[in-house]
Image: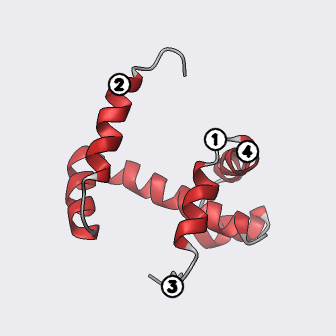
């Protein structure tokens, strides 16, 4: 990621951290992202949850509609990435209702 402007990233992340609730997040991300981008990000998080629970690729694909390439990419991030998925999964799985 050497060619990226980390200051711009940090400005964006700081803005996200200022959002106070789901409604503000929804409004902001609906303006910033396309519906497809939001669907893709949501799908990746669902894939990460299922991988973290030990589900296999075929079941994850059936449940989420994700391709095996997407599942593989998320799995690679879970195992070798910066720890972002693991960090958020540890925060959202405690007391979260998976039906929401």
Q: Nearer the viewer, mark 3 or mark 1?
A: 1
CA gap, disc 3 and disc 4: 26 Å
From the viewer's perspective, is residue 86 above or below residue 15? below
Residue nearer the viewer, 16 or 46: 16
In percent of the image, x 70 and y 51: which residue is there? 78
Instruction: Give the mark nearer the N terminus: 3 vs 2.
Output: 2
From the viewer's perspective, is residue 14 above or below residue 65? above
Whether residue 34 is visible here, answered yes or no, is no
Instruction: Give the mark nearer the N terminus: 1 vs 4.
Output: 4
Q: Nearer the viewer, mark 1 or mark 4?
A: 1
Q: Nearer the viewer, mark 4 or mark 2?
A: 2
From the viewer's perspective, is residue 60 above or below residue 68? below
- Which circle marks residue 7 in the picture? 2
CA gap, disc 1 and disc 2: 18 Å
Give the secondary structure at mark 2.
helix
Give the secondary structure at mark 3.
loop
Residue position for label 4: 76
């Amino acid at each position: 990621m050497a060619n990226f402007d980390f200051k711009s990233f940090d400005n964006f992340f700081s803005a996200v951290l200022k959002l106070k609730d789901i409604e503000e997040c929804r409004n902001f991300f609906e303006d910033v992202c396309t519906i497809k981008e939001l669907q893709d990000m949501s799908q990746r998080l669902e894939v990460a949850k299922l991988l973290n629970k030990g589900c296999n690729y075929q079941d994850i694909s059936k449940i989420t509609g994700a391709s095996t390439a997407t599942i593989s990419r998320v799995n690679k991030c879970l195992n070798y990435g910066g720890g972002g998925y693991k960090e958020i999964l540890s925060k959202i799985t405690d007391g979260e209702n998976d039906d929401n």
